[in-house]
Amino acid sequence: MNHNLKYGLALGLINVALSLAILLIDYHLLTSTWFGVLPLIINIAVLVVAGYELRKLHGGYLPFKEAFVSTFLIIVIAGAISLLYNILVFTVFSPEMADALHQDVIDRTAGMMEGFGADDTLIDQTIADLETNNPYSIGNLMVGYGYSLILGLVLALIIGAIVKKKQPEFE
């Protein structure tokens, strides 16, 4: 199996499994801050391992371009799997959970703004904006995937720089 496909599928399935575990524990945790950090750490670890394995497959040397492209393709594949999973969960299997999570986002945002001492008018306007824009709709999930690809591009640049190893000119 192709290296990028293998790691893209593995990372996508890891992300789905992590999300499923959180759903089984308490789906409200999906809106907590730490939930965003844990998958990021796991994703970085898997991408670095994939990069070093690719370098090993190339005899211990890996040009930056190939490291970057491979890492980014893994991110694209894993992200597409996660996107499909999220669309199925939040629109087909459990739209009521999406509504509850949307309300969690609104409540947390309002609480945070109140904690920072924001003006009531600003809080009301922000809540009104959030109420009309469901982050769990198919369109917004796809936009989120687009943003994750932009972040993935930056991550692929960093990981590509870490795992690259230039072959010496004279051996």
Image (cartoon, grey):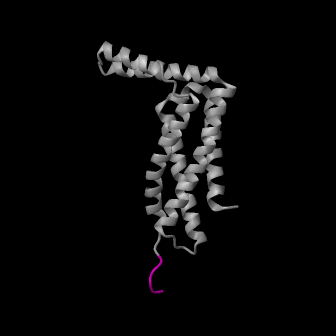
Vertical placement of 45 versus 38: above or below? below
| Residue that extends furthest to the front in the rendered view of this protein | 139
Vertical placement of 161 versus 128: above or below? below
Q: Can residue 21 be seen in this view?
A: no
Question: Does residue 132 appear to the left or right of 3 in the view shown?
Answer: left
Q: Can residue 110 be seen in this view?
A: yes
Vertical placement of 148 versus 171: above or below? above
Q: Residue visible at 63% across and 33% down?
A: 87
Magenta stretch containing residue 170, yes or no?
yes
Which region shows up in magenta? 167-171
Residue 17 in picture, x, y percent from top left? 65, 40
Front in this rendered view, residue 25 or 96: 96
Q: Is the magenta stretch mostly helix, strand or loop?
A: loop
Front in this rendered view, residue 67 or 22: 67
Q: Quadrant of the N terminus?
A: bottom right
Residue 75 in picture, x, y percent from top left? 55, 50
Q: Residue visible at 45% across and 62% down?
A: 162
